[in-house]
Amino acid sequence: MPRIEPLTPPYPEDVDRALRRWMPPGAPHEPLALFRVLHRHPELASRMFVLGSGLLGHGLLPAADRELVIARTTARAGCGYEWGVHAATLAPQAGLTPAQLRATAADDPAAAGVAWSPRQAALLAAVDDLHDTARVGAAAWDALRPHYDDAQLLELLVLTGWYRTVAHVANGLRLADEPWAEPFPAGPPAE
């Protein structure tokens, strides 16, 4: 049971319009529970929409890199809710395989039986550094540098912070997984 109940239909017209903007056109399911909870504070939701949609729809990072970063960030934060949403939808569309997605939830993705490219390994190391220390160490930064320009590196830092924020919200609310989401390989987070 979530700590704050998501809104349920029928929604007020302005909320219905906003929720439709948050979902991809033709999505086969209801708006995410996370979105429906956020719309209990419409001003906050509208501010969050700008950054979230900008990172997903207008970012400079290749989609596969973006989804790898999101998967590892949410996995490290123990956020099965957001990990499962992306693993079921955007990550496969971006070309991540089921084995790669499972490996993002492993303690050590490099030892999870997946052959990561140098670029992917650099992304995973940077996410782990940020999770562990709120910094990117010199080795991880130097490994990223050949693959990304300054604008993309800035976006990477914001992307990891953004999805850490999303994980805090989803975990703090104790949101149940969406029924169609991929189950988190590490199992449900401990209470």
Image (cartoon, grey):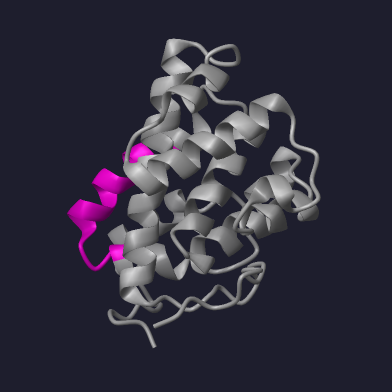
Q: Residue at x 70, y 58 (%)?
A: 102
- The image shows residue 123, relative to residue 19, as above or below, that is above
Where is residue 66 shown, x and y percent of the image? 56, 36
Regarding residue 40, the answer to whether it shows in the image is yes
- Residue 168 rendering spot, x and y as whole percentages: 33, 61
Magenta stretch, residue numbers: 38-53
Seen from the viewer's position, the closer of residues 169 and 47 is 169
Quarter of the image with the C terminus in it: bottom left
- State the image coordinates of residue 89 (x, y, percent, origin top left): 66, 54
Extreme bottom residue here?
1
Q: Quadrant of residue 107?
A: bottom right
**Above or below — where is 154 with respect to 166?**
above
Q: Is residue 47 magenta?
A: yes
Q: Is residue 178 above or below residue 91?
A: below
Q: Is residue 95 left or right of residue 108?
A: right
Is residue 16 at least partly visible in the picture? no
The answer to whether residue 107 is magenta is no
Residue 154, picture quadrant: top left
Viewer-nearest residue: 112 or 168 = 112
The image position of residue 81, as x and y in percent, is 51, 67
Nearest the viewer among 116 and 90 is: 116
Image quarter hosting the N terminus: bottom left
Left or right of 46? Residue 125 is right
Give the residue at x 43% y 12%.
150
